[in-house]
Amino acid sequence: MAKDGVDTDEDDDDEEEGGGGKKKLIMVVVALAAAGGAYQFVLKPAPPPEELADMAPPEPTITTMVAGEIVELEEMILNVGGAETTGYLRIGLAIQLDEMTMAGDFEPEIAIAKDVAVQYLSAQEADYLRSPEGRQEAKEELTTLIREAYGNEKVFRVLFTSFVMQ
């Protein structure tokens, strides 16, 4: 019997010395982890709208887009003006699409690009468009305007296929 009593006493001593303490420590750690997870996923307040805007993916730019197919528009004849000189511009445009847009899907929407081109180019001064720098700047600005008209999607860049002023 003494043997049984000694064994029982030793088990009680182990629990008092830390055997039960280990179980309590593990339970505390698990409870803290659960509380932290609950806060992170349930109780943590949403970030302010300014931070959400910072986390939004960037708008596609010409540097992140990849060039795709080219759709050629019909030549247009426009009046261009200015304070001192006026003239006519016969221009051929082509739209280089991004790699995700197919030419067949874009063709029903060509009128949007033509409208933007007519509005922009007819408002330019003839002398400005006659200079090589003016033509390059006009092409870059036209690319930006047409891309914006399509929600900064679909259009990679605008190309001039012909440019004749009179």
Image: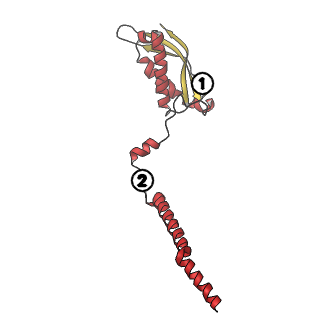
Pointer 1 residue? 71
**Residue mark closest to the camera, 1 vs 2:** 2
Identify the residue shown where x is 55% and y is 72%: 23
Colouring scheme, one of rainbow, by chain, secondary structure, one colour: secondary structure
| For residue 14, above or below residue 119 | below
User: What amino acid type is highlighted by mark number 1?
Assistant: Val
Q: Which mark is residue 46?
A: 2
Side of 102 where 49 appears, left or right = left
Q: Which mark is residue 163?
A: none
Identify the residue shown where x is 46% and y is 22%: 141
Identify the residue shown where x is 48% and y is 10%: 132
User: What amino acid type is highlighted by mark number 2?
Assistant: Ala
Q: Please report whichever mark, 1 or 2, sits nearer to the chain's N-terminal start.
A: 2
- Give x and y (percent) for residue 150: 50, 32
The answer, for residue 110, to whether it is visible in the render is yes
Along the line of sight, which residue is nearer the eye, 118 or 28? 28
